[in-house]
Image (spheres, grey):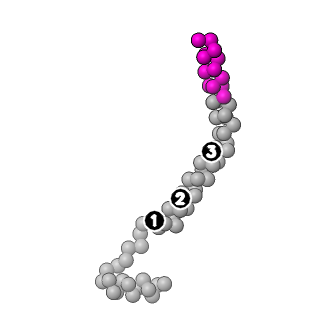
Amino acid sequence: MKHTVEYLKLRLGRPIEEDGATAVEYGIMVALIAVVIILAVLFLGETLETLFSEVAETIDQAGEEG
């Protein structure tokens, strides 16, 4: 692989930039973000369910009274 890079550098007359994120790095970032979202839902899921249930119950009671 190193020989191929050196060959291309010579043929193109300028150095090849090896900076920047590749598709693999973007894939890893997306996977890590997905893991964080899943963990947040798992840890906060029950709390959010309780909160939304209480809000829905309050709305139902307000609707019955009005």
Percent across and percent down for residue 63 are 60, 17
Q: Is mark 2 in CB contact (under 8 Å) with mark 1?
A: yes
Amino acid type at mark 2: Met
Q: What is the spatial separation of the Cα atoms under label 3 and label 1, in whole angstroms? A: 27 Å
Q: Is residue 37 above or below residue 13?
A: above
Q: Work out which residue is located at the far left of the displayed protein and give it.
A: 13
Amino acid type at mark 1: Ala
Q: Is residue 61 magenta?
A: yes
Q: Is residue 39 above or below residue 66?
A: below
Q: What is the spatial separation of the Cα atoms under label 2 and label 1, in whole angstroms? A: 10 Å
Label 3, secondary structure: give it: helix
Percent across and percent down for residue 58 are 63, 20
Which sits earlier in the primary sequence, circle 2 or circle 3? 2
Q: Work out which residue is located at the far top of the displayed protein and give it.
A: 65
Dot 3: few (<14), some (14–19), or many (≥20) neighbours within 10 Å? few
Q: Residue at x 62, y 44 (%)?
A: 40
Q: Residue at x 52, y 67 (%)?
A: 24
| Image quadrant assignment for residue 6 | bottom left
Say the numbered circle drawn on residue 21. 1
Q: Which residue is mark 2?
A: 29
Q: Nearer the viewer, residue 52 or 47?
A: 52
Amino acid type at mark 3: Ala
Residues drawn in magenta: 53-66
| Image quadrant assignment for residue 11 | bottom left
Dot 2: few (<14), some (14–19), or many (≥20) neighbours within 10 Å? few
Q: Residue at x 66, y 28 (%)?
A: 53
Q: Is residue 30 above or below residue 24?
A: above
Q: Which residue is mark 3?
A: 40
Split into 4 quadrants, where in the image is the C terminus? top right
Dot 1: few (<14), some (14–19), or many (≥20) neighbours within 10 Å? few
Label 1, secondary structure: give it: loop
Label 2, secondary structure: give it: helix
